[in-house]
């Protein structure tokens, strides 16, 4: 089975969905590590509960992003991680991690990219007044939410929506899409061809 590391900064509902899919035998990967930049984040407790090792750090304890990413890279190497799964990891990555893992690092973003990259994509969609938004899973490249798109789910937006009601609908879509896409990658069904991603039957 593929060995994955999940990077997260917050609630960890996506981490939980992935861990549950693995536990239920629906997803054939092994979660080797949680990487978290916020010691107080609920995701840390979720990892403990799931029996997943965690590398938890405070960015302020390091002189640069490259310094903590070098340490993360060492943790990944020790555990022979072959896929990095970003799940609400709210930090920009540098080439220290992005370059060696290009094609082996994916991210989930709560909009239909290329609409609403960056922070608060759900609020951006509400503010803009779009009628359809959604969820994107993509490979990570050097840009902001800019890498080749693997899969998307559309999510409708209703007039009565608040940020909370829309977020709930988006998170439900994420928790289905992410384990599914990780499964496709685990089965080696996903290939990058330039800007495009081909999913084999
Ligand atoms: C998710 O909605 C994810 O798409 C988003 O953070 C949330 C994390 O939730 N990521 C981004 O906005 C990245 N730019 P979770 O901690 O419950 O999985």
Image (cartoon, rainbow, N blue to C red):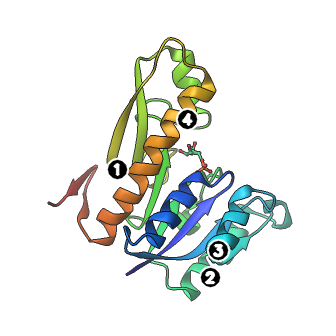
The residues bearing labels 2 and 3 have C-alpha atoms spaced at a distance of 5 Å
Residue at the left extreme, as displayed: 201
Chain-order first, disc 3 or disc 4: 3
Q: Quadrant of residue 119?
A: top right
Kindly identify which residue carries mark 2: 74
Name the image quarter holding the N terminus: bottom left
- Mark 1: few, some, or many residues within 10 Å (few <14, many ≥20)? some
- The residue at the point 26 percent across, 62 percent down is 190
Kindly identify which residue carries mark 1: 148
| Image spot of residue 188 (x, y percent) | 26, 71
Q: Secondary structure at mark 1?
A: loop
Using the image, tell me which numbered label, if any, was put on residue 72: 3
Q: Nearer the viewer, residue 59 or 201?
A: 201
- Mark 2: few, some, or many residues within 10 Å (few <14, many ≥20)? few
| Image spot of residue 31 (x, y percent) | 52, 75
Kindly identify which residue carries mark 4: 168
| Image spot of residue 106 (x, y percent) | 44, 58
């Amino acid at each position: 089975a593929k060995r994955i590391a999940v990077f997260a900064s917050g609630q960890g509902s996506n981490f939980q969905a992935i861990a549950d899919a693995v536990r239920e035998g629906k997803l054939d990967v092994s979660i080797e590590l949680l990487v978290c930049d916020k010691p107080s984040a609920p995701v840390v407790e979720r990892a403990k509960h799931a029996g997943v090792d965690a590398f938890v750090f405070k960015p302020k304890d390091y002189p640069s992003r490259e310094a903590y990413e070098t340490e993360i890279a060492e943790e990944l190497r020790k555990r022979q991680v072959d896929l990095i799964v970003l799940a609400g990891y709210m930090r920009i990555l540098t080439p220290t991690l992005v370059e060696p893992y290009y094609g082996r690092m994916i991210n989930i973003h709560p909009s239909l990219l290329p609409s609403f990259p960056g922070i608060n994509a759900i609020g951006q969609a509400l503010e803009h007044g779009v009628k359809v938004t959604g969820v994107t899973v993509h490979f990570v490249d050097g840009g902001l939410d800019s890498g080749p798109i693997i899969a998307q789910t559309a999510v409708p937006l209703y007039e009565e929506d608040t940020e909370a009601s829309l977020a709930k609908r988006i998170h439900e879509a994420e928790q289905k899409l992410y384990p599914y896409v990780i499964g496709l990658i685990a089965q080696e069904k996903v290939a990058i061809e330039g800007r495009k991603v081909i999913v084999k039957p």
